[in-house]
């Protein structure tokens, strides 16, 4: 997943807040590469499902279940990542994340269902540490006036990785430049290089001075605030169509629903490409008008319209255009991450980000399993997996967007104009 946040880090020294710290900037760049790679690996299985299914001899529903395991481990490690960075330091935290993803890549292509499941689980665990580590390092390396730019660039690294994980990897697999197993081994080799780069470049901050006292207090503050749950629910509902629809089931939707086999990868990649455009633009728009809620509500409407064309009127509008527009609109899913920080005290902003990450990905994991069961049931009733099955199942996403719209009415406006 991909998230804009202010980490709960120790305040940098005065000189660090006003000048560029090249050591931390280099470490940030290495970690941003890790974020790029892990996001590519997050989306890559969606375009090699046929090859994986053939090797492991599993059903399409079981394949979607393996992909969904990523969200469970990601959720937990995203929740604890801020504490790990504060108490242990970025050298250990970022390196641990890279190691976990590397092992996950090797296990994923080992040839059995159990190792594939465990490998995907480890990929999610390591990825949960990627973005938060990069933001921590950016906070230490960049002057305050450049920090938002650095965080935005980190986010774009991930989104571009998601785009390339579908658009670029697909021809490599389809043209048999690499087998799907070789792809994951090559990815593991790249991550080994990134690991050594991270270890050698990342400075020590608090390693060896672990203090676990008082760790529960920030979580209690965030979880006692009802507004935190509203923000988390809105974010989770906005992520469902992309996490479950595009990543877990998008490939099968295009293959079995629209019978369009030649341009599947590029069509899937339009959504993360839309994120690259939509995340910074919609965030900037929200800052300019000083309001969060109108942008979120407008984006929810746009997601409903563009998603409706994709699923229910697939031949009416250019498919690449609708995918791109849907991705741009869903970029507003980052705004609830800003809102949850703004509805909570300053001293727990990092924890608030971890909490919303946790809820978003736990709900994505649960809904992936529920959606798999629904697809399986509808397929048996219909006799085959076809467009009608997906159109019926899509009501889950439509309902989620409607609920998110209603909940947005109840969340407190946190934009600058409201504060005035």
Image (cartoon, grey):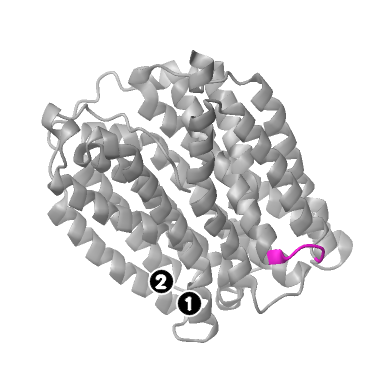
Q: Residue at x 25, y 65 (%)?
A: 192
Whether residue 244 is visible here, answered yes or no, is no
Disc 2 designates what residue?
Answer: 184
Image side of residue 196 versus residue 74, left or right: left
- Identify which residue, 270 or 69, lies in the foreground: 270
Give the structural element (helix, strand or loop) at label 1: helix
Q: Residue at x 14, y 43 (%)?
A: 21
Q: Is residue 172 above or below residue 312?
A: below
- Does residue 71 sit above or below 375 in this rendering? above
Q: Is residue 83 above or below residue 105?
A: above
Q: Which residues are magenta?
A: 315-319
Q: Position of residue 361 (x, y in %)?
A: 53, 42
Q: Assess whether mark 1 and mark 2 are in contact (beta carbons under 8 angstroms).
A: yes
**In the current view of this chain or complex, which residue is farthest to the top?**
420
Percent x, y for residue 339? 50, 27
Disc 2 versus disc 1: distance between alpha carbons? 7 Å
Residue 317 drawn in magenta: yes
At mark 2, the secondary structure is helix
Residue 34 placement, left or right of 45: left
Q: Is residue 155 above or below residue 288?
A: below
Indicate the position of residue 323 as horizontal and vertical percent values: 65, 59
Quarter-of-image position of residue 230: top right
The label number, if any, that marks residue 386 in the structure image:
none
Residue 57 or residue 5, whichever sits in front? 5
Q: Which residue occupies 25% across, 54% down?
A: 29
* Pointer 1 residue: 180
Quadrant of res 52 = bottom right
Pointer 1 local density, CA inside 10 Å: few below 14, some 14–19, many at least 20: many
Q: Residue furthest bottom?
A: 176
Q: Residue at x 65, y 49 (%)?
A: 241
């Amino acid at each position: 997943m991909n998230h804009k946040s202010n980490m709960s880090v120790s305040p940098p020294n005065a000189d660090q807040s006003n000048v560029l710290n090249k050591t931390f900037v280099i470490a940030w760049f290495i970690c941003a590469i890790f974020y790029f790679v892990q996001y590519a690996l997050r989306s890559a299985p969606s375009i090699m499902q046929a090859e994986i299914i053939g090797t492991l001899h599993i059903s399409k529903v079981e394949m979607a279940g393996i992909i969904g395991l990523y969200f469970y481990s990601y959720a937990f490690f995203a929740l604890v990542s801020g504490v790990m960075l504060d108490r242990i330091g970025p050298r250990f935290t970022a390196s641990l994340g890279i190691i976990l993803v590397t092992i996950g890549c090797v296990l994923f292509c080992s040839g059995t269902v159990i190792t594939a499941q465990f490998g995907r689980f480890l990929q999610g665990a390591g990825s949960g540490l990627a973005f938060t580590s990069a933001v921590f390092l950016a906070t230490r390396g960049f002057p305050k006036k450049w920090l938002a730019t650095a965080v935005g660039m980190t986010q774009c690294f991930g989104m571009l990785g998601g785009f390339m994980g579908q658009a670029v990897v697909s021809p490599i697999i389809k043209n048999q430049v690499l087998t799907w197993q070789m792809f994951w081994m090559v990815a593991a080799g790249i991550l080994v290089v990134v690991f050594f780069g991270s270890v050698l470049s990342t400075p020590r901050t608090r390693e060896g001075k672990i203090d676990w006292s008082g760790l529960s207090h920030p979580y209690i503050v965030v979880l006692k605030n009802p507004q935190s749950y509203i923000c988390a629910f809105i974010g989770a509902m906005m992520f469902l169509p992309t996490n479950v629809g595009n990543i877990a089931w998008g490939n099968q939707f295009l293959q079995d629903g629209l019978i369009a086999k030649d341009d599947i990868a590029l069509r899937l990649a339009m959504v993360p490409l839309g994120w690259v455009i939509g995340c910074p633009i919609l965030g900037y728009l929200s800052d300019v008008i000083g309001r969060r809620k109108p942008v979120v509500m407008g984006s929810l409407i746009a997601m409903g319209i563009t998603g409706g064309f994709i699923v229910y009127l697939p031949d009416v509008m250019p498919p690449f255009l609708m995918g791109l527009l849907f991705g741009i609109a869903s970029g507003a899913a980052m705004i609830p991450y800003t809102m949850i920080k703004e509805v909570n005290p300053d001293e727990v902003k990092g924890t608030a980000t971890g909490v919303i990450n946790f809820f978003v990905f736990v709900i994505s994991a649960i809904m992936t399993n529920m959606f798999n069961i629904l697809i399986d049931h509808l397929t048996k009733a219909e006799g085959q997996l076809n467009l009608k099955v997906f159109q019926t199942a899509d009501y889950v996403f439509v309902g989620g967007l409607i609920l998110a719209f209603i909940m947005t009415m109840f969340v407190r406006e946190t934009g600058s104009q409201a504060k005035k």
